[in-house]
Amino acid sequence: MKKGTAFGVGVGPGDPELMTLKAIRLIRENDVIAVPGKEPRESVAYKIAVQAVPETAEKELLPIYMPMVKDRRLIEEEHRKGAEKIMRYLDMGKNVVYLTLGDSTIYCTFSYLQHILETEGYPVELINGIPSFCAAAARLNLPLTEWDEPLHVVPAVHRTQELLDQPGTYVLMKSASHMKEIKELICRSGRMAAAVINCGMDSETVCRSVEDIPDDAGYFSLIISREQ
């Protein structure tokens, strides 16, 4: 029997109107929808998709636990369990659509499953979604780059001791857990910054300066920092 394909489908940053036609088509055409988290209907990715594709609620929802911990052994065990859940459907010839926030190629949880699935010989396809930093820049009416400026996409939580000293624009992702230190980093670097929290969601907050960004900003916080 021909194996099914695992699709890593980006659903965009939060606004269901920013989902791609291809993402919507794949959700509609396939019966098994994998969702990160223990309870699929509580997942942000699911809540976005079901607004654009209401019939998602009638699909078979497959929870994939993706722990946010530092224990590498536990993480690898859970990733293997998640991949094996998907494999069971692929072995039956069924496709599995894994919903992921933003874009499927940028700090995406599906990447960990992709490596396992491909190693085991299963077909995998990545379907792009609008990245969170592109949506945030548009919400701020702020061009990310102009002329010959480079763009630096940085997991800020791992860079709190480094200066933002390269020319161009910095996108600071994964900022929330160390927001105070990251704000101090921006000030030391002499840059301007703006942020969007929960971009495209009902709880969206726009911050036009470093001072406006709360130290306790939530998980879905993204900072764009440009030279003065």
Image (cartoon, rainbow, N blue to C red):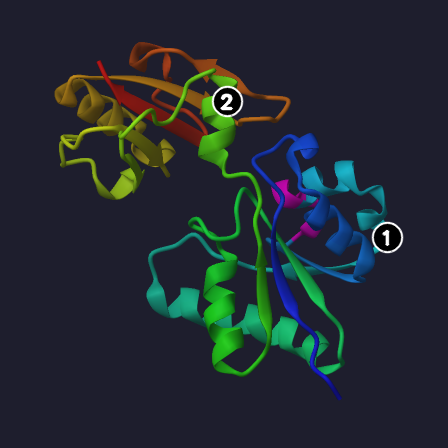
Residue 93 lies in quadrant: bottom right
Q: Which mark is residue 134?
A: none
Identify the residue at image location x=33%, y=56%. 70
Q: Residue at x 72, y 69 (%)?
A: 95
Q: Earlier in the sequence, mark 2 or mark 1?
A: 1
Answer yes or no: is residue 200 visible.
yes
| Rendering coords of residue 59 (x, y %) | 82, 56
Residue type highlighted by circle 2: Ala
- List the residue tagged with mark 2: 138
> In which quadrant is the C terminus drawn?
top left
Local packing at callout 1 (Cα closer than 10 Å; few below 14, some 14-19, many 20+) is few
Q: CA distance from mark 2 to mark 1?
A: 33 Å
Tag 1 residue:
58
User: Which secondary structure dominates the residues rendered in magenta?
Assistant: helix
- Magenta highlight range: 39-45
Amino acid type at mark 1 = Glu
Query: Any magenta on residue 43?
Result: yes
Q: Residue at x 80, y 43 (%)?
A: 53
Q: Secondary structure at mark 2?
A: helix
Q: How crowded is the residue under tag 2: few (<14 C-alpha within 10 Å), some, or many (20+)? A: few
